[in-house]
């Protein structure tokens, strides 16, 4: 990847795409600032090297129209307090006024443009819009890994007009996910959970070529268990994917990948806080039951395998972790990964939330900041926002 470390930044107008798409409440207050803090190393580096920094991001889905509900005003105020520096906030992301402000920007100053999704051109990756954004800077830095799976003007189109480099967050995400996928030490393991096989088919297929061991849990395990003629009762199960699951099991055998399924499970009549949880063997699931977590024997077997692995990537909870009595498997796996000396990579979304809730971030080598972007990367898809930093 082309790194900004190789650049002379002093006095340059540096246009940087960040992912400040933070969760907000109805008054636009920021509920979690992880995405902002994740971009601070690159921001501080540019400012310390006396660049003139112009930041741009999207927030929510204003659908190509100006709408105060999706303004970045509060993000600007929060960034200013994190940096202990004034942040010049524009009410637009293109146009005369913005151009003038950018021309007046001094070395070491930072300016934040308004939501780029106020314009239809952004999501359409319209070259006219890309050119207007590009005109604001002399160098483009993409540090928005979380939006890298979108080919939009501010993430990819703009690279047709400006020399393009990866920010530190982007660089680190790509390096760690590449490590998890094939550059890391062997044995390499993937732990896959979450609701559905349908959402993760591309992921499983790609991982079959990269991993030595794949552990399955969560709702998706049910489809694999049923494909092996086990009764899964009323569980979440994708009957239309039974053949696909069998073909994955066969492919794993052919490729000498150990695809491991639960031996015992936690079942209940309903997904609710007061549902009575019961542990049964995978051959003993009653027709009126739902499989909602992996059982203690399975946890033990998975923990032993985790001990063997040198590189582990994990995506998706192993049970309905939102309820205490179905969260044991997910918790045990999180704790084991945090205690492991292997390179451990957590693949975004729900799985990162669990690690944060348990306060175990310190023990994990890398927690990806992307949701969809991380998943697509792990599926082996070339992300447009990454590609522009490489060519
Ligand atoms: P995903 O977005 O695919 O990672 O799925 C996350 C969701 O899967 C969580 O909300 C979990 O409650 C759900 N989940 C995990 N295990 C099961 C299961 N055995 N049955 C139903 N849902 C599950």
Image: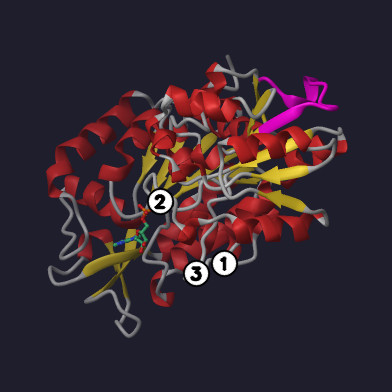
Which residue lies under the disc numbered 3?
Answer: 25
Magenta residues, as a range?
2-15
**Residue 10 counted in the magenta span:** yes
Along the line of sight, the residue nearer the viewer: 194 or 6: 6
| The CB of the residue at mark 2 lies under 8 Å from ligand 1 | no
Q: Secondary structure at mark 3?
A: loop
User: Looking at the image, which residue is at 62% across and 61% down?
Assistant: 74
Taking the view exactly as shown, the residue that stands out farthest to the top is: 391
- Pointer 1 local density, CA inside 10 Å: few below 14, some 14–19, many at least 20: few
Callout 1 touching callout 3 (CB < 8 Å): yes
Residue 72 in picture, x, y percent from top left: 58, 54
Which residue lies under the disc numbered 1?
Answer: 31
Foreground mark, 2 or 1?
2
**Residue 106 counted in the magenta span:** no
Q: Give the vertical position of 270 relative to 387 (above or below).
A: below
Q: Secondary structure at mark 2?
A: loop
Residue 330 in picture, x, y percent from top left: 47, 61
Callout 2 touching callout 1 (CB < 8 Å): no
């Amino acid at each position: 990847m082309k790194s900004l470390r190789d650049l002379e930044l002093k006095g340059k107008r540096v246009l940087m795409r960040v992912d400040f798409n933070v969760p907000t409440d109805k008054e636009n207050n920021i509920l979690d600032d992880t995405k902002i803090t994740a971009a601070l190393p690159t921001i501080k580096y540019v400012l310390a090297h006396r660049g003139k920094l112009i930041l741009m991001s999207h927030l929510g889905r204003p659908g190509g129209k100006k709408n105060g509900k999706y303004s970045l005003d509060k993000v600007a105020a929060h960034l200013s307090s994190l940096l202990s520096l004034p942040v010049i906030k524009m009410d637009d992301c293109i146009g005369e006024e913005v151009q003038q402000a950018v021309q007046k920007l001094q070395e070491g100053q930072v300016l934040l443009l308004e939501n780029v999704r106020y314009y239809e051109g952004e999501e359409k990756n319209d070259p006219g819009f890309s050119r207007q954004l590009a005109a604001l800077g002399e160098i483009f830095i993409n540090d928005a890994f979380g939006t890298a799976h979108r080919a939009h003007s501010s993430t990819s189109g703009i690279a047709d007009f400006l020399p393009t480099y990866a920010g530190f967050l982007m660089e680190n995400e790509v390096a760690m996910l590449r490590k998890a996928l094939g550059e890391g030490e062997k044995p390499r393991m993937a732990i896959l959970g979450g609701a559905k096989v349908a959402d993760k088919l591309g992921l499983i297929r790609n991982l079959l070529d990269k991993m030595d061991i794949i552990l399955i849990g969560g709702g998706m395990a049910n489809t694999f268990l049923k494909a092996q003629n086990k009764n899964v009762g009323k569980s979440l199960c994708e009957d239309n994917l039974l053949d696909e699951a069998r073909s994955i099991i066969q492919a794993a055998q052919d490729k000498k990948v150990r695809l491991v399924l639960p031996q015992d499970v936690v079942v209940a009549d309903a997904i609710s806080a007061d549902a009575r949880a019961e542990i049964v063997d995978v051959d003993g699931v009653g027709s009126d039951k739902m499989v909602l977590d992996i059982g203690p024997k399975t946890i033990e077997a998975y923990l032993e395998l985790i001990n063997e692995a040198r590189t582990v990537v994990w995506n998706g909870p192993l049970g309905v972790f939102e309820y205490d009595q179905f969260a044991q498997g997910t918790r045990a796996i999180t704790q084991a990964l945090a205690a492991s000396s292997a390179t451990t990579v957590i693949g975004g979304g729900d799985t990162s939330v669990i690690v944060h809730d348990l306060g175990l971030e310190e023990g994990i080598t890398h927690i990806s900041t992307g949701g969809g972007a991380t998943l697509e990367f792990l599926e082996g898809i070339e992300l447009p926002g990454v590609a522009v930093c490489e060519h």
